[in-house]
């Protein structure tokens, strides 16, 4: 952006260049009437010189000063503070100009300070007055993490051009919020305003940083989402790989081998490992050198702005930096920050007097030490601006002393920026345009705001095999508000395996689904929420000719089922759902209510061979289990009869051997029971196949017509909410009034019934009836208040006793007991809060209800004539 040309000197910085004398005089008159500094009226105005004419004065419009991305913003609604300077602001500009000249004389080799950049109207404003303390009514923005995340998501970065020069403009936070774009200085100004409003001791910093931070280049960083996923996988692998140590184990036999040969083998292995390690280190070094970015020719010259948070407020124990572009916190010794020129807040502006040749690692942030930090506005005579060179050759210069006295007595004007407002919709919408794409090392992260995409996609992480991000390996997608409860989808490119994960609540209780294609009877793996299913199914793994199912917490103790289907004959293709079952193997957990010899551990149904095998559980001290094998009787199709049972149909091994063998009747009953179980098992397998086909059909239908769930509490998007509210609110109000009226009428009818429901009442009866109604109603109100108060007192006393018990036993409590205690406290606090609110509401409405009853009694036909004065 080209700077605006003006014919006035920097000390003037008036409300607008080229204004006529009447307008200028009117502005000054208004400032004198409304501002505290009444002695700043005539010193700040200088008439146009006689050699200048109106044609020589260039009047800049706001569109000339605005960056290109903000010219579509309507500036007509901005207040006058955006367009002109008050007398106090004019004095502050003159003080800052003197400080800038003094800084240039003391440090001629340093870059000029960012003191008074132009705003969106081209008016110079001091940077401290651009900060507007704001506390937003959103719980997510009460902490520094939430504020930084909101700023980083809400704005898009505009790079400094050139990167080694300070910006000529610093837009107001309101303009930045509306345009959703800005430089790093606009980022830090908005973030610092939010942090100051939230109670943090925050400062905007102008300094130097590395290239990657200034350009928001994260292509050399690991994706944080990928890092969290890898940590979870490592934890799972460690937990699965950890062996279970048993107290009693059988010792393995000693292996007879030569110690000499073992030592020689270990030496050879050590040499091979050392050679392999050197090769790996060399390859890693070469890879790091190839991935290392080229040197930055502007190293140490790239200007950047960030936020400094000092310890002391909001329980902050250590000073730290916040990069507003990435919302990340850094220690003050981080090597990404190369130096600091100045920093400021809403009260003052400080210039760094320390050596930053080694970065910010050794810097101190005692802003009251004038040897380290020089302030533009001094609060005491000991705090001198740029004290190392504050004394000039002519120490008796009256003009310098006058400027110093002026700066010492001057106080920072209040912010010229309007109130910053953030709606809930602004927080939900997130990124400008509803999306943001970030490149990481071998990864690309795409983020979308909710409801922006029709399929509910909010995050897409693509991982690559190369640094150029051309060869994709894995694609992870996260969803929200899907009607089919889909949460995550992962595609592995090498195997073309897709894994979908679902939330609870889907009709098939599906937890995850891994597949290559949605065609039935192909390889796939499904996991289910077992507690939500009646059959306790946990996992189902299916291939073309096999199906394995795992169960949990079943009443029959079944935990595994393996089904083998008969392969089709060459030239024949089995129809979908008509696969022939060849073999079924079921395994059961131990049922302690039965003897081990009668508790089935495994049963095998060989349907093609008409064979059944049963293996029982071992005794606690047993070695060999009992086993039985049955041959199903042959069925004759022509006669419809079944082959008679014979002892030859049963073979087996019984433990212990000393027991008598079972009789034929018992064995026949076992055979009949097994045949019934076989039929049930076959039906269960068929139902499993049917369920798989139903799941696949449902997924195809849902993917072809994706629907998003919109909560009725989301009043922005749920249009029916407004219609329902308009219809329901009058009905609710009428219902409450009707209920209260009926309650009062019932009380009057009850008392009239005690008098025999006379058609007319005497004056004494009418007056007594009115008093009785009011007394009964008052008694009912007091009784209700006592009940609520007693319940509140009881819950509060129980909570105190529970807290006292916790203080006495917290050192010996287990984790489960502590979790139960916390859950109890949470529920008790909720009950106490509800009862307290109900009691307060009851006390507020009781007088109104009492007066309403009295008014109704005065309108009762049998009482009203006697109450007329």
Image (spheres, grey):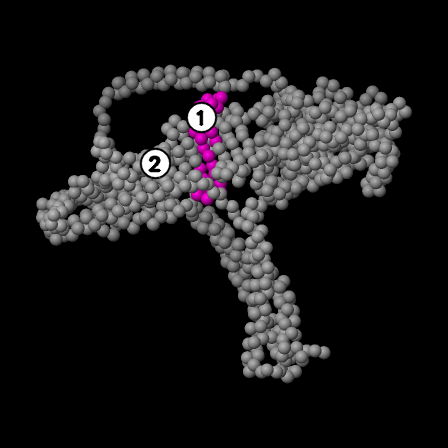
Residue under the point 25% across and 46% down = 681
Query: What x and y, as percent, mark residue 603?
Result: 21, 43
Tell which circle, 2 or 1, labels the residue nearer the N-terminal end: 1
In the image, the segment drawn in magenta is 461-488
| Callout 1 crowding tier (Cα within 10 Å): few <14, some 14–19, many ≥20 | some
Name the foreground residue: 296 vs 452: 452
Total numbered labels? 2
Quarter of the picture holding the C terminus? bottom right
Q: Say which residue label 1 marks.
A: 472
Q: Say which residue label 2 marks.
A: 519
The numbered mark at residue 770 is none
Residue under the point 53% across and 62% down = 791
Q: Relative to residue 225, is residue 162 drawn left or right?
A: right
Quarter of the picture holding the N terminus? top right
Label 2: state its secondary structure. loop
Q: Distance between the residues labelled 2 and 1?
A: 25 Å
| Callout 2 crowding tier (Cα within 10 Å): few <14, some 14–19, many ≥20 | few
- Note whether residue 554 is visible: yes
Q: Relative to residue 676, is residue 330 drawn left or right?
A: right
Dividing the picture into quadrants, the one containing residue 738 is bottom right
Residue under the point 66% across and 77% down = 864
């Amino acid at each position: 952006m080209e700077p605006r040309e003006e014919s006035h000197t920097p000390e003037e910085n008036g409300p607008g260049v080229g204004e006529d004398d009447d307008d200028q005089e009117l502005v000054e008159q208004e400032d004198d009437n409304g501002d505290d500094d009444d002695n700043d009226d005539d010193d700040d105005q200088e008439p146009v010189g006689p050699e200048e004419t109106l044609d020589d004065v260039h009047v800049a419009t706001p569109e000339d000063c605005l960056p290109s991305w903000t010219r579509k913003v309507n500036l007509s609604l901005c207040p006058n503070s955006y367009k002109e300077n008050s007398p106090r602001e004019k004095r502050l500009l003159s003080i800052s100009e003197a400080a800038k000249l003094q800084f240039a004389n003391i440090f001629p080799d340093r870059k000029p300070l960012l003191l008074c950049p132009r705003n969106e109207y081209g008016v110079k404003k001091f940077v401290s007055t651009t900060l507007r303390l704001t506390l937003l009514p959103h719980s997510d923005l009460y902490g520094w993490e939430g504020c930084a995340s909101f700023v980083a998501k809400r704005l898009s970065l505009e790079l400094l051009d050139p990167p080694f020069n300070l910006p000529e403009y610093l837009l107001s936070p309101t303009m930045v919020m509306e345009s959703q774009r800005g430089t790093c200085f606009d980022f830090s100004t908005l973030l610092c305003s939010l942090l100051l409003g939230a109670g943090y001791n925050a400062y905007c910093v102008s300094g130097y940083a590395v290239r990657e931070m200034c350009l928001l280049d994260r292509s050399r960083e690991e994706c944080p989402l990928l890092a969290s996923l890898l940590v979870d996988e490592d934890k799972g692998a460690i937990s699965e790989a950890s062996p279970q140590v048993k107290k009693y184990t059988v010792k393995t036999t000693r292996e007879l081998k030569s110690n000499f040969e073992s030592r020689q083998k270990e030496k050879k292995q050590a040499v091979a490992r050392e050679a392999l390690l050197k090769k790996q280190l060399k390859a890693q070094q070469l890879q790091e050198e190839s991935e290392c970015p080229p040197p930055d020719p502007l190293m140490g010259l790239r200007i950047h702005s960030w936020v400094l948070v000092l310890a002391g407020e909001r329980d902050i124990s250590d000073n730290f930096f916040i990069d507003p572009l990435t919302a990340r916190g850094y220690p003050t010794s981080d090597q990404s920050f190369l130096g600091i020129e100045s920093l400021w807040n809403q009260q003052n502006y400080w210039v760094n007097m320390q050596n930053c040749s080694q970065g910010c690692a050794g810097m101190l942030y005692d802003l009251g030490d004038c040897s380290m930090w020089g302030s533009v506005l001094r609060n005491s005579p000991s705090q001198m601006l740029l004290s190392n060179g504050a004394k000039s050759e002519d120490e008796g210069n009256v003009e310098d002393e006058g400027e110093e006295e002026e700066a010492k007595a001057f106080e920072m004007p209040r912010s010229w920026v309007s109130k910053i407002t953030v709606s809930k919709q602004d927080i939900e919408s997130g990124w400008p345009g509803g999306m943001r794409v970030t490149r990481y090392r071998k990864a690309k992260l795409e983020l979308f705001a909710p409801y922006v995409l029709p399929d509910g996609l909010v995050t897409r992480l693509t991982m690559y095999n190369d640094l150029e991000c051309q060869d994709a390996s894995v694609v992870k997608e996260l969803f929200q508000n899907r009607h089919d409860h889909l949460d995550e989808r992962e595609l592995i490119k090498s195997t073309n395996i897709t894994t979908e994960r679902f939330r609870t609540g889907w009709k098939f209780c599906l937890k995850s689904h891994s597949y290559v294609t949605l065609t039935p009877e192909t390889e796939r793996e499904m996991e289910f929420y077992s507690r939500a299913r009646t059959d306790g199914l946990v996992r189902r793994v299916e291939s073309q000719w096999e199906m394995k199912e795992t169960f949990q917490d079943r009443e029959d103790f079944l935990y595994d089922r393996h089904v083998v289907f008969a392969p089709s004959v060459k030239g024949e293709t089995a129809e979908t759902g008509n696969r022939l079952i060849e073999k079924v193997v079921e395994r059961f957990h131990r049922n302690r209510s039965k003897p081990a010899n009668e508790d089935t551990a495994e049963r095998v149904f060989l349907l093609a061979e008409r064979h059944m095998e049963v293996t029982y559980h071992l005794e606690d001290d047993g070695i060999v289990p009992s086993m039985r094998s049955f041959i199903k009787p042959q069925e004759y199709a022509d006669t419809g009869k079944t082959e008679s049972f014979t002892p030859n149909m049963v073979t087996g091994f019984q433990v212990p051997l000393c027991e008598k063998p079972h009789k034929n009747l018992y064995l026949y009953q076992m055979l009949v029971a097994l045949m019934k179980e076989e039929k049930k098992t076959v039906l269960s397998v068929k139902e499993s196949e049917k369920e798989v086909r139903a799941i696949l059909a449902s997924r195809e239908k849902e993917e072809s017509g994706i629907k998003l769930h919109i909560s009725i509490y989301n009043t922005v998007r749920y249009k029916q909410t407004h219609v329902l509210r308009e219809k329901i609110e009058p009905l609710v109000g009428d219902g409450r009034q009707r209920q209260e009226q009926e309650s009062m009428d019932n009380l009057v009818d009850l008392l009239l019934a005690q008098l025999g429901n006379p058609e007319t009442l005497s004056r004494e009866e009418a007056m007594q009836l009115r008093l009785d109604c009011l007394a009964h109603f008052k008694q009912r109100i007091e009784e209700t208040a006592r009940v609520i108060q007693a319940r509140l007192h009881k819950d509060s006393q129980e909570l105190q006793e529970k807290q006292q018990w916790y203080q006495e036993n917290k050192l010996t409590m287990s984790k489960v007991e502590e979790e139960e205690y916390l859950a109890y406290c949470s529920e008790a606090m909720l009950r106490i809060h509800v009862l307290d609110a109900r009691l307060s509401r009851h006390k507020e409405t009781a007088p109104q209800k009492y007066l309403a009853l009295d008014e109704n009694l005065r309108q009762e036909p049998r009482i009203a004539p006697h109450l007329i004065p």
